[in-house]
Amino acid sequence: MFDKAEDLLIEFVKLKEGKHLLKFRVDESFFVELGSMDVLKADVFVSVDIEKNVNLMQLHLELNGFMTVECHRCLVDLPLEIDSKYRLFVNLNSLENLDIEYSDDGSELVYLKSHEFELSIAKSVFESCFLALPILRNCDESDEKPCNQIMIQKLQSLIVESTNEVDSRWDKLKQIKNK
């Protein structure tokens, strides 16, 4: 069964100090629910290793699976593998007014106020999945090369050859410069 964004809640007040392991599974409906129409299919397993202390929780997220998106060049369905790790530090019982701080090592620090009792990791999972995808998504990386050849031919027919004709006004200016 696939989890929805609302299912990716960690009720940390119910967790005892120590290590805990939570597992989730998300599909394309998870991404649609969070506002992305780019994902055509998905099956991503999310493993969350939690280490809870008195005032701090460390979450190690590991994401494995696949997402199917459109090729940026030929628009064919392109399945891409997801294999990503992400760290999230949660400061519990914080009096800080800050919501989120970022550090250079790829981890994120979240401050929770004393009246909060749960943490949603849906946005972190969503962003980690997209960050695991290549920026340019095309069939070149695929072993099978599932390119839509009709679309590729159409794109090649639209390529305009550039001519390097020099404007005659520049010739006049060059003559002035050379004097």
Image (tube, rainbow, N blue to C red):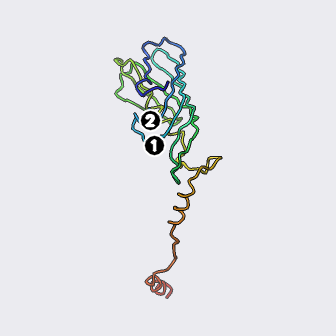
Which residue is at a point 51% across and 39% down the rendered structure image?
131
Q: Which mark is residue 64?
A: none
Secondary-structure class at tag 1: loop
In contact (CB < 8 Å): disc 2 and disc 1? yes
Residue 123 rendering spot, x and y as whole percentages: 43, 32
- The kind of residue on which mark 2 rests is Phe
Identify the residue position indicated by label 1 in the image: 38
Q: Is residue 19 above or below residue 165?
A: above
Q: Residues within 10 Å of mark 1 (few under 14, many from 20)?
A: some
Q: Is residue 120 above or below residue 34?
A: above
User: For the residues marked 2 and 1, what is the alpha-carbon distance in whole angstroms?
Assistant: 8 Å
Residue 108 rendering spot, x and y as whole percentages: 47, 31
Q: How many marks?
A: 2
Q: Answer left or right for 102 relative to 147.
A: left
146 or 38: nearer the eye? 146
Q: Which mark is residue 31?
A: 2
Secondary-structure class at tag 2: helix
Residue 16 rendering spot, x and y as whole percentages: 48, 11
Which residue is at a point 42% across and 19% down the rendered structure image?
92
Which residue is at a point 44% across and 33% down the rendered structure image?
29
Q: Residues within 10 Å of mark 2 (few under 14, many from 20)?
A: many
- The kind of residue on which mark 1 rests is Asp
Q: Is residue 178 above or below residue 27?
A: below
